[in-house]
Image (cartoon, grey):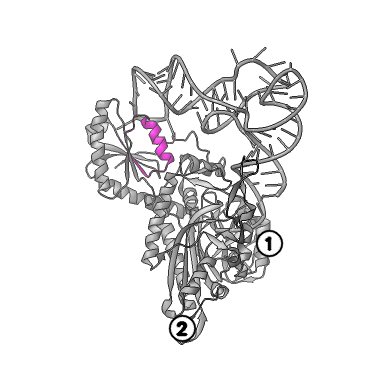
RNA sequence: CGGGGUGUAGCGCAGUUGGCUAGCGCGCCACGUUCGGGACGUGGAGGCCGAUGGUUCGAGUCCAUUCACCCCGACCA
């Protein structure tokens, strides 16, 4: 391949640059990339077809991984009786402040006939909560499904929407309503449940790294950051380009908390009655936000080939209709040869836009590979192949093009992962004093690896003063004697702090 | 819930101390020339100036009220 230097002249006219305003850059990509739109409802977004296509690709990869690990899909109600939520003390404590509540079931025309009002006659006996998560409604069902160890384990996942009435929202990263999957499993033993929770954590990590091209740190949350109602919360933490951490997925070991709250018992092999052990785990459309912030640049989205709704776009360059006809012929052959390799291809011979416009447009949409084919190529039996991740262009022979492209897609997938990994590695900084901690947090960002005395008081004090939180205690964290950067008390290991989304 | 913004054409915006027919860029429509990095020319269509109420001979502009959304914080996946 005849490599050419990336064209430095390429800059978008309509996307805010990262260095100018990172938040605005992110919003521009989401809106102008056609992923999502604001809606008439505060805090709720419209996921547009292109954005939803990414979600569908995520879903299908994850769904297969869940099925491969023995899980089945099911569906539980959107509404949860208010009393259910309060059964588990920590759980209600954690979610009460952000629940949408249904109080009535009917509207009527107002007295003056001009508008529709809530019918006060139609007040619900017991209010319903729009699910912020489904542990309670699901464990209520599990109670009636479980009698004996023979009924266990139950390994269920559901794809659903949930509502958390957030104060402040950001497209994909935090919206009032969002889409996710939530796995809810029931087990006969503590060990088995713990094994399930960690197994699904590994599934998430594998998905993030292999599909999204986003390296993640697997870890366990501090008590303060733990899920409401869990005994242990595992997480995968990613780092994005502005140096902030983002929790990309969580898996919870729930102990017997929900079994106790919903009185779910079973008879074990020793003929003794015991409470059931539980896990729950989830990832959401937030992954799309993570994906965007991990890889994209000032020209637009950069999507990993494995999740890109369109992997290759072919753009014809023709001066007239006769030429276009000849190019069409060749391009359609290329298209089908690529499709035969399982590659998703769009051939854009729409003559309403110029090639230059299309180049910019598909760059903004993050399509991994662009093939341009014009009269020169017809003569030379070649095409121009441009890759989105490096913005480099090459002239490639038509012979063996589909193999070349398939290989290039793989290379791009690897490259964006490698790039993100290198960035992440450069942004895990060991720090040994609180001054250094604060300085580097501001100047460099990323994860600060620091000693911590293990108390919530210290964690909260650091959060209060610096906005940084403990993102996780990495799994297999090496023991290392040291002193807490804040309190000076003895510490056995370093933990990862960062400012986070 | 606090602080800050913004509401004028599909999108982005301008609109002076109140003044007559509300503009500009992009996009859209038609025709022509173009087409290897967001083409150009000519012509054209498109407005309840967020809503309500006031002041005034006259309001996009001043006053009051109100609604909505965005951004920054506290809270959170």
Residue B48 drawn at (x, y percent)? 60, 27
Is A368 magenta? The answer is yes
Residue A344 covered by magenta stretch: no
Which range is magenta? A349-372
Give me the chain letter of mark 2: A
Residue A85 appears left or right of A388: right
Give the number of the mark in front: 2 or 1.
2
- In the image, taking residue A210 as reference, residue A462 lies left or right, namely right
Q: Secondary structure at mark 2?
A: loop
Image vertical order of residue A47 relative to residue A349, above or below: below
Q: Quadrant of residue B37?
A: top left
Closer-to-camera residue (A481/A347) = A347
For image coordinates 36% across by 29% down, the residue present is A352
Residue A268: mark in rendering? 2
Please give the count of numbered marks on the rendered protein.
2
* One can see residue A477 in this view: no
Q: Position of residue A247 (x, y in %)?
A: 53, 58
Q: Position of residue A101 (x, y in %)?
A: 60, 57
On the image, the x and y values in percent for residue A204 come to: 44, 61
- Report how far apart the C-alphas of labels 2 and 1 lie in the structure: 45 Å
Residue A253 in sight in this render: yes
Left/right placement of residue A196 relative to residue A354 reads right
Give the class, few, some or many, for how many residues have Cα within 10 Å of label 2's Cα (few <14, many ≥20): some
> Which residue is the site of mark 1?
A461
Q: Tell me if mark 1 has few (under 14), some (14-19) or many (20+) residues whose alpha carbon lies within 10 angstroms of its own.
A: some
| First in sequence: mark 2 vs mark 1 | 2
Task: Answer with the quarter of the image where residue A457 lies.
Answer: bottom right
Q: Nearer the viewer, residue A476 or A261?
A: A261
Q: Residue furthest bottom?
A: A270
Classify mark 1: helix, strand or loop: helix
Identify which residue is drawn at 68% across, 58% down. Answer: A464
């Amino acid at each position: 391949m005849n490599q050419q230097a990336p064209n430095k002249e390429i800059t978008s006219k309509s996307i805010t640059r990262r260095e100018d305003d990172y938040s605005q850059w992110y919003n521009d990509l989401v809106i102008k990339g056609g992923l999502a739109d604001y809606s008439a409802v505060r805090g709720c977004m419209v996921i547009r077809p292109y954005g939803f296509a990414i979600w569908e690709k995520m879903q299908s990869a994850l769904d297969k991984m869940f099925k491969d690990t023995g899980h089945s899909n099911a569906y539980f109600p959107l509404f949860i009786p208010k009393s259910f939520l309060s059964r588990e003390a920590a759980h209600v404590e954690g979610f009460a402040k952000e629940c949408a509540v249904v109080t009535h079931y009917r509207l009527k025309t107002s007295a003056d006939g001009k508008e529709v009002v809530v019918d006060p006659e139609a007040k619900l006996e017991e209010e319903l909560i729009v699910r912020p998560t489904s542990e309670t409604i699901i464990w209520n069902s599990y109670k009636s499904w479980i009698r004996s160890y023979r009924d266990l384990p139950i390994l269920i996942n559901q794809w659903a929407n949930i509502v958390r009435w957030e104060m402040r929202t950001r497209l994909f990263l935090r919206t009032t309503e969002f889409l996710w999957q939530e796995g809810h499993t029931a087990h006969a033993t503590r060990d088995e449940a713990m094994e399930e929770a960690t197994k699904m954590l590994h599934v998430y990590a594998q998905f993030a790294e292999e599909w999204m091209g986003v390296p993640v740190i697997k870890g366990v949350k501090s008590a303060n950051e733990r899920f409401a109602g869990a005994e242990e919360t595992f997480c995968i933490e990613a780092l994005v380009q502005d140096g902030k951490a983002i929790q990309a997925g969580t898996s919870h070991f729930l102990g017997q908390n929900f079994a106790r709250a919903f009185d779910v018992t079973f008879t074990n092999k020793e003929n003794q009655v015991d409470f059931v052990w539980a896990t729950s785990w989830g990832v959401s459309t937030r992954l799309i936000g993570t994906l965007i912030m991990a890889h994209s640049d000032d020209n637009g989205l950069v999507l990993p080939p494995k999740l890109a709704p369109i992997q290759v776009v072919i753009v014809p360059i023709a001066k007239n209709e006769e030429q276009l006809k000849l190019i069409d012929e060749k391009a359609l052959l290329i298209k089908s040869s690529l499709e035969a390799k399982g590659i998703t291809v769009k051939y854009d011979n729409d003559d309403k836009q110029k090639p230059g416009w299309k180049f910019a447009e598909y760059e903004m949409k993050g399509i991994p590979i662009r093939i341009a084919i014009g009269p020169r190529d017809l003569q030379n039996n070649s095409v121009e192949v441009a890759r989105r991740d490096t913005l480099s262009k090459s002239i490639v022979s038509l012979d063996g093009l589909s193999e070349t492209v398939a290989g290039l897609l793989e290379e791009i997938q690897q490259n964006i992962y490698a790039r993100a990994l290198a960035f992440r590695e450069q942004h895990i900084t060991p720090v040994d004093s609180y001054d250094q901690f604060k300085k580097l947090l501001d100047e460099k960002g990323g994860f600060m690896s620091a000693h911590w005395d293990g108390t919530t008081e210290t964690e909260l004090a650091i959060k209060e003063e610096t906005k940084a939180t403990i993102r996780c205690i990495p799994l297999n964290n090496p023991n290392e004697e040291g002193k807490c950067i804040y309190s000076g008390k003895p510490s056995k290991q370093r933990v990862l702090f960062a400012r986070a989304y």
